[in-house]
Image: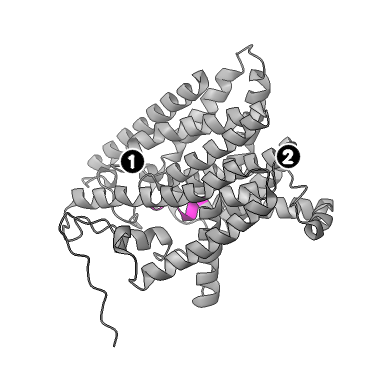
Amino acid sequence: MTYIFAAIVVSFLVTLIVIRVHLARSHTRGHVAEGRRAEWIRESSLRGLGRAGGIGVAMGLLLSLLARLLDDAPYAMASARMGLMLLASAAPVFAAGLIEDFTQRLSIAVRLVAAFVSAALAGWLLEAWIVRLDVPVLDAAIALPLVSVLFTCLLVAGITNAFNIIDGFNGLAGGVASLILVGIAYVAFKVGDVLIVAAALTAVGAIAGFMLLNFPRGLVYLGDGGAYLLGFWIGVLLVLLVGRNPEVSAWFPVLLCSYPVCELLFSIYRRAIVRRAHPGLPDVAHLHHLIYKRLVRWLVANNLPSPRTQRNALTAPYLWIITSIGVAPAVVFWQATAVLQIGCALFAVAYIYSYARIVKFRVPHWWVLRKPHQRPPHPPEQH
């Protein structure tokens, strides 16, 4: 608990410093700081320290792990070494994210390559390779070293980018990551993997320090660097958890991360197949965007910055609940491969069904937040 608390404090203080420097620079330039209010989607011109909240998370992890090196408690040294190697492996993709946050000129391809490099480094330093999928036909293929390496890099890079995709509202990516990390810590505790428990809970602490300043007011954003760091940290921990503990089903990570995974795969399908565009191009048609625009109706007619901030903050809890729908059964049935597979299929169907209902303005009334005695808006007439 000491190191979790240390991660919270360090992350909070570093994030606070980032905010103060950002505001000071904004005042110097004679502009209103973007960090003072949270729009429903980040302005394209917002860059630099306003999107560098991930620095606080990284520093919270780093200083907590370094302090652990001085502890003579059992597992402290091994825990610190594993965490530091994991953080070192994340350096390429974290740096790529920060460069994008400050310049917005780094191509999607370069960032994807950085994610692959980080995944390969983690595999080499920590032996974090996928060795089984709990599907007989696929297990024969994954047993080949080259296939294992390529699939591991693809999966970790995919999870890393999935968290960048869902990072669109105050508290969204941080809250989703915390729920998933708590699920990882719980299952790691059940199998007695102390090192993974410590790594997961330390990350939760670092996120908590950032969230104190990000949610609900949006004083600073996680940014690409922070989102990549959290996605990478989760991806590698899941690979290690399954690889080091044969009793954990290989489908546990899939259901645990069902929301970000579905968001990633559906976004690729929607962009590449439906719109015939580049799958890496950003858009505003993600599930969290639709929830903001079509479900969070409270103060919808008020254009003042404060209500926009409140609407922004009301969006994340919707996605926290959706994430919990995958996390809860995953941590209960973490050994039951068949149940986890059925859960993954059901979640994917529910995701697509919900997306379609929201797009067509056919959502149940209880899905929509509105003022008391406020009538739900009528759907547009079909011509």
Quick one: 216 or 68, which is closer to the camera?
216
Up the image or down, 76 lies above or below 11; here it is above
Q: Is residue 102 visible?
A: no
Q: Amino acid at mark 1?
A: Phe
Q: Does the magenta-highlighted stretch encompass residue 65?
A: no
Residues at discs 2 and 1 in contact (Cβ within 8 Å): no
Residue 246 percent location from the top left of the image? 75, 40
- For the C terminus, the image quarter is bottom left
Residue 357 percent location from the top left of the image? 39, 69
Up the image or down, 110 lies above or below 86; here it is below
Circle 2 SS class: loop
Q: Residue at x 53, y 65 (%)?
A: 349
Circle 1 SS class: loop
Up the image or down, 40 lies above or below 188; here it is below
Q: Residue at x 35, y 46 (%)?
A: 170
Question: Where does the magenta region start and end?
Answer: 163-168
What residue does disc 2 label? 247
Residue 123 percent location from the top left of the image? 72, 42
| Residue 363 relative to residue 372: left or right | right
| Residue 201 relative to residue 43: left or right | right
What residue does disc 1 label? 215
10 Å neighbourhood of mark 2: few (<14), some, or many (≥20)? few
